[in-house]
């Protein structure tokens, strides 16, 4: 029997581009998109009632990034307002794949238009915090991720 399909709803989190995010030309430094993605994933987990420190304390496990694949389409610039999304593509017993996008939010009176700046997939593993050895995610965590 195949595992149930993951939720398709995207979570989105607003991010403003600050000086510290840019290079000398005022363009977002490429590695900072990974930071934006991390913030969005963390806030997505919080929106599901998952607080990572409490989860570590109660289960002994933590999330770690195992793999990333990023594609850059257009640059973000100083003071831009971004929308950074996160959605589950696949969930296993000890890892999950999350699709993420950074979108440029454009202000228009009648519609919320966005431009795709960067997109990627992030494989997240669940490991024992003390040893960093893979372990199965707790059933309660898996249940929370399916909501």
Image (cartoon, grey):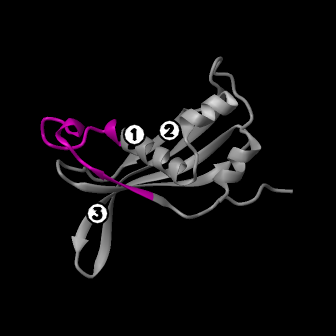
Q: Give the alpha-carbon distance from disc 1 to disc 2, as whole Å.
A: 9 Å
Residue drawn at x 13%, y 35% as measured from the top left = 24
Q: Find disc 3 in the rendering and name its residue.
A: 105
Residue drawn at x 71%, y 60% as measured from the top left = 5
Which stretch is magenta? 12-33
Q: Which mark is residue 68?
A: 2
Question: Which quadrant of the rendered structure holds the C terminus?
Answer: bottom right
Above or below, 106 against 102 in this view is below
Above or below, 107 against 101 in this view is below
Residue 141, by quadrant, is top right
Element marked by disc 3:
strand
- Please check the rendered image and state whether residue 14 is part of the magenta-colored stretch, yes or no: yes
Count of picture labels: 3
Element marked by disc 2:
strand
Residue drawn at x 62%, y 36% as measured from the top left = 55
Q: Find disc 1 in the rendering and name its residue.
A: 34
Q: Give the alpha-carbon distance from disc 2 to disc 3, as whole Å.
A: 24 Å
Locate residue 106 relative to residue 100 in the image: left or right. Answer: left
- Please check the rendered image and state whether residue 43 is part of the magenta-colored stretch, yes or no: no
**Is the residue under label 2 in contact with that under label 1 (CB below 8 Å)?**
yes
Furthest-right residue in this view: 1
Q: Which mark is residue 12?
A: none
């Amino acid at each position: 029997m195949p595992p149930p399909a993951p939720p398709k709803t995207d979570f989105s989190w607003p991010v403003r581009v600050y000086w510290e995010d840019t290079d000398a030309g005022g363009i977002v430094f490429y590695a900072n998109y990974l930071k934006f993605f991390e913030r969005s994933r963390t806030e997505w987990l919080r929106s599901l009632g998952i607080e990572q420190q409490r989860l570590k304390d109660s289960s002994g496990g933590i999330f770690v990034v195992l793999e990333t694949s990023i594609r850059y389409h257009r640059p973000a610039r100083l003071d831009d307002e971004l929308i950074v999304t996160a959605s589950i593509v696949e969930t296993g017993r000890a890892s999950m794949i999350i699709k993420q996008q950074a979108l440029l939010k454009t202000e228009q009176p009648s519609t919320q238009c966005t431009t795709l700046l960067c997109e990627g997939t992030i494989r997240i593993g669940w490991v024992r915090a003390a040893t960093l050895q893979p372990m199965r995610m707790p059933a309660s965590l898996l249940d929370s991720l399916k909501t």
